[in-house]
Amino acid sequence: MSGHSKFANIKHKKEKNDAAKGKIFTIIGREIAVAVKEGGPDPANNFKLATVIAKAKANNMPNDTIERGIKKAAGDGSAANYESITYEGYGPGGIAIIVKTLTDNKNRTAAAVRSAFTKGNGNIGTPGCVSFMFDEKGQIIIDKEECEMDSDDLMMEALDAGADDFNEEDDSYEIITAPEAFPEVEKAVKDMGLVPASAEVTMIPQTYVKLTNEKDVASLEKILDLLDESDDVQAVYHNWDED
């Protein structure tokens, strides 16, 4: 039992994602293109592509859209122009923030990320300044209302498939995997007939921080909203306890 409701955060994110589905598909499309360029079009032999496909399906991207993206990337040299850059920093109240970007213009992206932190009273730090507070893990969240399986049976199936940990919360189940085990565990979950509320390789905070000052909350939300608005930003991770 973790005591922190990831599912509440995921429902909040999904509401935002549904309002910006086009941006989500654009982001995943870039990730598919880069993964294909780096490791080829076969997900069975390309772990990075397999994880991006899992993310695409978790965001309800149609299979034909995924396949078109893979085929296009396999014959499109322009995808190699994208570069992955990670920014780290602090928001109000000492909240640790990691921003992962994929860009064809480093100056534009750096300016957008720096502006978001500045406008929300945060500060960009040096590489590694907050990443040590997070663990890269595969995370699968299952809505209890959508799961008829007994929790013990689900836990045993997940662990047998290669999961590292299983947590039960009031409204959901959380399955944690090593990044390399994620595709196999995610497949096992779907083979059980379950549709995860979220399934991705992510950065999980080792501890969470609560904010009690309303101004700090408003400022942090400003940072996160501005980052969400940038097409170059692929993912944002933080240790803010939003409960």
Image: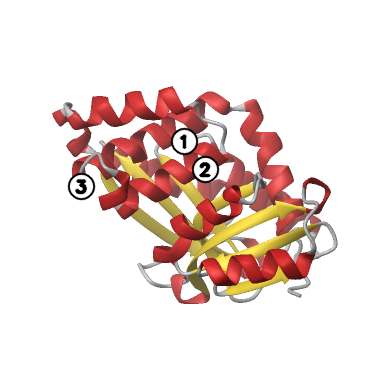
Residue shown at the point (33%, 46%) measured from the top left: 49
Q: Nearer the viewer, residue 131 or 94?
A: 131
Instruction: Specify the amino acid type for callout 3.
Output: Glu
Q: Quadrant of the C terminus?
A: bottom right
Across and down, in percent, residue 213 comes to: 79, 62
> Vertical placement of 192 versus 139: above or below?
above
Q: Is residue 70 visible?
A: yes
Q: Earlier in the sequence, mark 3 or mark 1?
A: 3
Please, what secondary structure does the residue beneath circle 3 have? helix
* Residue 227 marker: 2
* Residue 230 marker: 1
Other-residue count near label 1 (Cα within 10 Å), few / some / many at <14 / 14–19 / ≥20: some
Instruction: Specify the amino acid type for callout 1.
Output: Ser
Give the foreground label among 3 and 1: 3
Please, what secondary structure does the residue beneath circle 2 have? helix
Mark 2 touching mark 1, by CB under 8 A?
yes
Label 3 sits on residue: 38
Across and down, in percent, residue 64 comes to: 42, 23
Alpha-carbon distance for marks 2 and 3?
26 Å
Residue shown at the point (25%, 36%) measured from the top left: 104
> Vertical placement of 169 versus 140: above or below?
below
